């Protein structure tokens, strides 16, 4: 006998043999039993899930000379003719190559004639969405009122391309993707009858590679039999199909956990050396992160499609990550996959993406952050009163005598407080901030020294400036009333703003204010806006020690 591929040799011959579509086959058998057949059906779904096979079964079942339990007996002449594709009354039409209006007109003429040998004349149009708009329009009238001996079955993988006018005239059945368990069960049955030994891990790999299509999985199965003979194992399947070994993905998460950048570059070199498809690798890596997220969220492996050995590893490795970590890793992998679509240097992009994952800082849960702040607050509150003459913002404490003697001293901070501060990313106010240096001409912080306020009409001149501004620009003058001059030194007038809005106002009207300031103060003055919250405003006249404590440490008087 001529060799037949598995997909053809093991094509279902009765409705019960159709894998994964019980909701459809049961409905069709009930319709046959109750004599409630529609004149047109639409079968939609992904490739390899049984649409055309079910259409043939329906054609055989309604024309069989001696049906058994509303299934075709596959023994009568009509069933054999339909199975062999030589029946005059059952025609399969390829919608891609017969898509024009002329072909549909020919079909309209043929439906007028009664079937030759069968009870029904059945037209199975595969990939019906490929018909032209004119062809669909020509089909409408026939589809709406066909002769009683005609039955149409349309099959498509892209139902959204079928016009609504056609959909409304059909009974629609949506075929679903076949699950991995169902594909494995079918392949195991075939292997048993064909006397082929194949282990469970190999079946799992073939089923996953089929991606919901039983026909694709059967084609891969044939390929493995040709490569391996009658004994097939998982490692042989991986080598034959050049599939990325799942062990490689666990190595990636180990590198991320240990922050091993050199190992990451070596792994990329290994991937390129083995000739793996980079986008296939990234797809598998995203699935790996997803599996780890599922295990971490459910503390179970039922939703993970892998071998038992790898399921145990997921349970162990998931403990080293948080959900936020895995969300970020999935996003990086997805963005990297999208960027490779048009990138001319895939290896470079893969290296950068993998190093980004490895160097990614661990996420901090907001609950943990708040708990740490509460603990830090308790620790700060436990300091002896003798070392706290002033309550200092943040986590810095100093006593007045020490500052008076040294003017600027090393701030004493408990080790446990310093550890907590560093853990949550806080910077003490006595520490130098690069950002404050960068923005020193536009935005100053409380850590910057303020020039002393001279006596002798300073406040009166400022009030005169505010009045003059209000006369010329009312909105600017109103905003200026909420600001406060804090010092005039070497031609620089420092103005304290209570919030960002006032700070922005000063910056936008800088030239206008500089001109008026020159008129009021009698000399050219440069304005320097600083951000000082309203509750921390420094009075113009106060003791210089208090001013220095607030300036250096952000201190507040204790009520």
Image (cartoon, grey):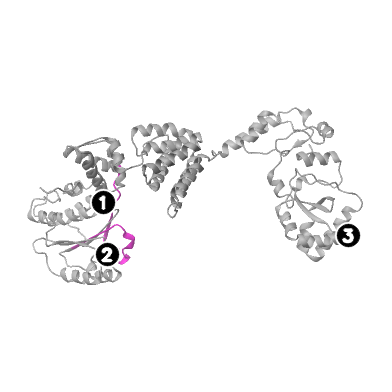
Tell me whether the residue at label 2 lies in contact with that at label 1, contact meaning CB atoms closer than 8 angstroms: no
Farthest residue, direction right: 456
Q: Is residue 400 magenta?
A: no
Residue 171 placed where, x, y %? 26, 59
The tag earlier along the polypeptide, 2 or 3, is: 2
Is the residue marked by circle 3 packed among few (<14), some (14-19), or many (20+) residues within 10 Å?
few
Query: Which residues make up the magenta segment?
Result: 151-180
The tag earlier along the polypeptide, 3 or 1, is: 1
Residue where numbered disc 2 is placed: 169
Residue 196 placed where, x, y %? 19, 37
Residue where numbered disc 1 is placed: 48
The tag earlier along the polypeptide, 2 or 1, is: 1
Q: Residue at x 9, y 64 (%)?
A: 116
Residue 35 placed where, x, y %? 17, 57
Q: Is residue 320 left or right of residue 158?
A: right
Q: Image quarter for residue 89? A: bottom left
The quadrant the C terminus occupies is top right
Q: Which mark is residue 522?
A: 3
Of discs 3 and 1, which sits in the foreground?
Answer: 3
Of discs 2 and 1, which sits in the foreground?
Answer: 1
């Amino acid at each position: 006998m001529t060799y037949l591929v598995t997909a053809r040799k093991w094509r279902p011959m009765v409705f019960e043999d159709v894998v994964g579509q019980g909701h459809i086959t049961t409905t069709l058998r009930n319709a046959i039993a109750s004599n409630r057949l529609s004149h047109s059906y639409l079968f939609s779904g992904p490739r390899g899930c049984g649409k055309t096979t079910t259409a043939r079964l329906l054609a055989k079942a309604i024309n069989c000379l001696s049906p058994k339990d509303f299934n075709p007996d596959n023994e009568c002449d009509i069933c054999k003719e339909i199975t062999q594709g030589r029946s005059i009354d059952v025609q399969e039409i390829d919608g891609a190559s017969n898509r024009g209006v002329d072909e549909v007109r020919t079909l309209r003429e043929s439906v007028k004639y009664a079937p030759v040998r069968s009870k029904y004349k059945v037209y199975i149009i595969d990939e019906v969405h490929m018909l032209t708009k004119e062809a669909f329009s020509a089909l409408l009238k026939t589809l709406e009122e066909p002769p009683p001996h005609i039955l149409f079955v349309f099959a498509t993988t892209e139902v959204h391309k079928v016009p609504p006018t056609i959909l409304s005239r059909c009974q629609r059945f949506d075929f679903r993707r076949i699950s991995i368990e169902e594909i494995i069960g079918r392949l195991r049955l075939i292997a048993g009858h064909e006397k082929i030994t194949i282990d469970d891990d190999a079946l799992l790999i073939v089923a996953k590679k089929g991606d919901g299509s039983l026909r694709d999985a059967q084609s891969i199965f044939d390929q493995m039999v040709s490569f391996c003979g009658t004994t097939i194992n998982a490692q042989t399947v991986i080598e034959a199909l050049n599939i990325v070994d799942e062990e490689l993905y666990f190595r990636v998460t180990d590198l991320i956990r240990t922050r091993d950048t050199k190992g990451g570059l070596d792994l990329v070199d290994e991937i390129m050396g083995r000739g793996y498809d980079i986008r296939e690798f990234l797809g598998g890596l995203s699935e790996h992160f997803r599996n780890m997220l599922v295990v971490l969220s459910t503390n179970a492996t039922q939703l993970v499609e892998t071998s038992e050995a790898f399921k145990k590893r997921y349970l162990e490795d998931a403990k080293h990550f948080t959900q936020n970590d895995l969300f970020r890793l999935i996003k990086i992998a997805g963005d990297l996959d999208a960027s490779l679509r048009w990138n001319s240097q895939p290896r470079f992009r893969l290296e950068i993406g993998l190093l980004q994952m490895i160097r990614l800082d661990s996420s901090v849960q907001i609950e943990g952050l708040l708990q740490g702040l509460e603990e830090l607050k308790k620790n700060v509150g436990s300091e002896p009163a003798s070392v706290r003459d002033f309550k200092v913002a943040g986590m810095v404490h100093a006593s007045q005598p020490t500052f008076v003697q040294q003017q600027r001293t090393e701030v004493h901070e408990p080790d446990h407080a310093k550890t907590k501060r560093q853990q949550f990313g806080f910077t003490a106010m006595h520490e130098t901030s690069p950002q404050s240096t960068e923005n020193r001409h536009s935005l100053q912080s409380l850590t910057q020294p303020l020039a002393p306020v001279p006596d002798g009409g300073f406040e009166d001149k400022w009030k005169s400036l505010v009045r003059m501004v209000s006369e010329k620009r009312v909105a600017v003058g109103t905003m200026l009333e909420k600001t406060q001059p804090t010092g005039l030194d070497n031609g620089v007038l420092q103005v304290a703003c209570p919030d960002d809005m006032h700070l922005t106002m000063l910056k936008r009207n800088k030239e206008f204010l500089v001109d008026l300031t020159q008129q009021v103060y009698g000399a050219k003055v440069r304005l320097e806006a600083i951000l000082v919250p309203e509750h921390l405003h420094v009075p113009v006249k106060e003791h210089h020690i208090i001013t220095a404590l607030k300036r250096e440490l952000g201190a507040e008087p204790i009520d």
